[in-house]
Image (tube, helix red, strand yellow):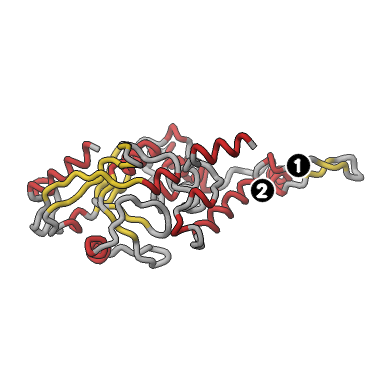
């Protein structure tokens, strides 16, 4: 068991699909990860079933042919000669005709089953790469990737959240921002803007543009903290931790910016914003 021992000693990668009790914080050890764990596990089982590698040999039939135990292999055989799915043709024909095709991801980067904070993830790939595999559009045809970021950070369900606010500030963000899950209606966990997460999302998705939303929710705070790095057991880290243990031990390193009190809900350009709000945006752009 030398390999298993080395994994336990070094910590488990967030990209791994296995975890042990010791890699989860104590408060989560007995907690049921309801929908997230079930959907992620179901997705991995589905991938295994449909993969050609799941065919574990064959047996000769009375007609001299081979029979595979994998449903995926049988379905692939039946599908030979069929036309491509209409969705693939429609989208690619539209692109060939010079039309604009917009693909939207429904969840955040850290919920991605491959690049998120597994096992606290969804069952699919809401990152930009998943748009290609899900639509049948080749990656070379994607010309722009726009990331949607809030002026603060939110998360639904369990999982690591270094900047989470469990005080009146968190409740205030949740109330003013109307932070509830679209599908489940669960209240979102709220925290200050997390620059390492933003950098990670930018890198994983290959973002060309960032669309900042809900800046007006921050109106009224005298000082607004921004997480620029983490302190992990006394060591500063400017990037997202690569193990679950480190992520759960991470505490935010904040820089504080001046807030504003003016109502900016009617602002339609940078010139309409107060100086402090513009400086907040410019500071986020640096990270």
Picture quarter with the N terminus: top right
Q: In this view, does 25 lie to the left or right of 268?
A: right
The residue indicated by pointer 1 is 56
Q: Position of residue 123 (x, y in %)?
A: 51, 52
Q: How crowded is mark 1: few (under 14 residues within 10 Å), some or many (20 or more)?
A: few
Q: Position of residue 77 (x, y in %)?
A: 72, 43
The answer to whether residue 181 shows anywhere in this view is yes
Q: Is mark 2 on a helix, strand or loop?
A: helix
Calculate the distance from the C-alpha at mark 2 to the C-alpha at mark 1: 11 Å
x 13%, y 49%: residue = 277
Q: Give the answer, above or below, for where 261 lies relative to 194.
A: below
The residue indicated by pointer 2 is 49
Lower sequence index among marks 2 and 1? 2
Residue 237 placement: quadrant? top left
Q: Where is residue 217 in the image (x, y as percent from the top left)?
A: 20, 58
Q: Where is residue 206 in the image (x, y as percent from the top left)?
A: 37, 36
x 39%, y 59%: residue = 156
Count of picture labels: 2
Residue found farthest to the top = 140
Q: What element carries label 1?
A: loop
Q: Give the answer, above or below, for where 32 lies relative to 59.
A: below
Q: How crowded is mark 2: few (under 14 residues within 10 Å), some or many (20 or more)?
A: some
x 48%, y 53%: residue = 122
- Please state which of residues 130 and 198 is positioned toward the viewer in this rendering: 198
- Please state which of residues 33 and 25 is positioned toward the viewer in this rendering: 25
x 18%, y 56%: residue = 218
């Amino acid at each position: 068991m030398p390999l298993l021992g080395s994994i336990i000693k070094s910590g488990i990668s967030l990209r791994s699909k296995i975890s042990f009790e010791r890699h989860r914080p104590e408060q989560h050890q007995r907690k049921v990860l309801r929908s997230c764990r079930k959907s992620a596990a179901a997705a991995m089982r589905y991938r295994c079933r449909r993969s050609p590698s799941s065919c574990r040999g064959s047996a000769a039939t009375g007609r001299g042919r081979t029979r595979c135990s994998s449903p995926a292999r049988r379905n692939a055989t039946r599908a030979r000669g069929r036309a491509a799915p209409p969705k693939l043709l429609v989208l690619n024909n539209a692109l060939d005709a010079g039309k604009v095709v917009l693909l939207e991801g429904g969840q955040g980067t850290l919920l991605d089953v491959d690049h998120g904070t597994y096992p606290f993830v969804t069952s699919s790939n809401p990152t930009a790469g998943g748009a290609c595999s899900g639509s049948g559009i080749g990656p070379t045809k994607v010309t722009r990737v726009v990331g949607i970021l809030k002026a603060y950070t939110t998360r639904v369900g369990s999982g690591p959240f270094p900047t989470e606010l469990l005080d009146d500030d968190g409740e205030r963000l949740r109330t003013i921002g109307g932070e509830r899950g679209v599908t489940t209606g669960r209240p979102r966990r709220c925290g200050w803007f997390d620059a390492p997460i933003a950098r990670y999302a930018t890198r994983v998705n290959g973002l060309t543009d960032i669309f900042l939303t809900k800046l007006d929710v921050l109106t009224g705070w005298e000082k607004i903290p921004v997480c620029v790095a983490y302190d992990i057991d006394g060591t500063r880290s400017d990037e997202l931790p690569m193990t679950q243990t480190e992520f759960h031990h991470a505490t935010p390193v904040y820089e504080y910016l001046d807030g504003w009190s003016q109502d900016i809900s009617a602002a339609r350009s940078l010139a309409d914003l107060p100086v402090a709000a513009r400086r907040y945006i410019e500071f986020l752009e640096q990270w």
